[in-house]
Amino acid sequence: CSVKQISDQRKRQEGRGTGTEKDYKPYIQAREVNSLGTCSNPIDWKTGRTVELLSQGESALWHILRWDDDVVDIREQYPLDLKQTFKISGKLGIQHPGKNPMTTDLLATMRDGRLIAYSLKPSKAVLNNKRTVEKLFLEKMYWTKQNVEFRLIFKSDINMTLYHNIRLVVEFYDAKFVHDDASVLKHLIATKQVSVNMESAILSIRKLKPIYEKEIAIWRRNSMSVTF
């Protein structure tokens, strides 16, 4: 994706990069970039916020992090303090990437209060580019000075099966979207009321339904008692 020119001043006026959970406003929005269909706007099934993701890799990593119950918040396209990155780049002798704030792909808040900053790249091949390495080092040093753990993740290392399975079930995280036995089971998996192997193969809901027939029936019975 290549970012269209929208001024930093305007973004600041809109409150970009501020807020948490459902009130967070990412610094870059998917509609502001030119892409080949890799940008996406999933709905955070836990907060209802529309998320701004700029690549399939970001989408995969975001879904997997959101699936983790130890992660309580994720802020995407998070802007770094411009004065700080200029200061660090000067000390390191690295050219600052432009006059606008750098961004970290995903900033996760953990249940214990820790922050973890994630930078996502397609593969380790990008490390052959000196300029890419410089910018990554600058980003890492910024977070190190903030006492925040920095993790470099490669799309090639992400479990895409887990990603696709998460997408398959979280559509029915909210019970109001449940309408048949298949969606009941997806709801039960999404809310972790039943546990299945999400990592090794794409889920076959058709094959899983007979296995969890009892759990589906109990959920339907309880749902009807709550509704009526």
Image (tube, rainbow, N blue to C red):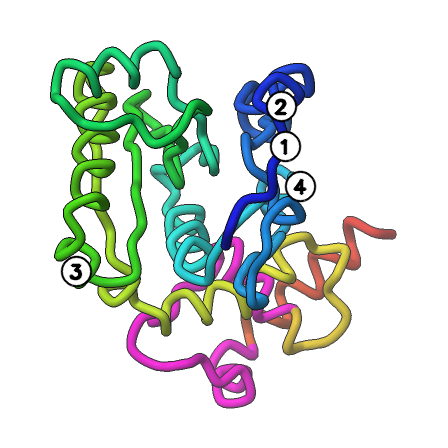
Q: Answer with mark 1 or mark 4, whichever residue precedes in sequence.
A: 1
Q: Which mark is residue 6?
A: 1
Q: Position of residue 215 (x, y in %)?
A: 55, 69
Task: Describe the element under mark 2 as helix, strand or loop.
Answer: helix
Q: Say whether marks 2 and 3 touch (CB < 8 Å).
A: no
Q: Position of residue 207 (x, y in %)?
A: 49, 89
- In the image, taking residue 114 as reference, residue 187 lies left or right, namely right
Q: Label 2 amino acid?
A: Lys
Q: Crowding near pointer 3: few (<14 within 10 Å), some, many (20+)?
A: few
Distance of label 4 from label 3 (alpha carbons):
34 Å
Task: Describe the element under mark 3 as helix, strand or loop.
Answer: helix
Magenta stretch: includes residue 209: yes
Reading the image, the residue beneath label 3 is 124
- In the image, taking residue 59 as reference, residue 39 lies left or right, namely right
- Front: mark 1 or 2: 1
Distance of label 1 from label 4 (alpha carbons):
26 Å
Residue bounds of the magenta highlight: 184-213
Q: Label 1 amino acid?
A: Ile
Reading the image, the residue beneath label 4 is 48
Distance of label 2 from label 3 (alpha carbons):
32 Å
Q: Answer with mark 2 or mark 3, whichever residue precedes in sequence.
A: 2
Q: Crowding near pointer 1: few (<14 within 10 Å), some, many (20+)?
A: few
Magenta stretch: includes residue 145: no
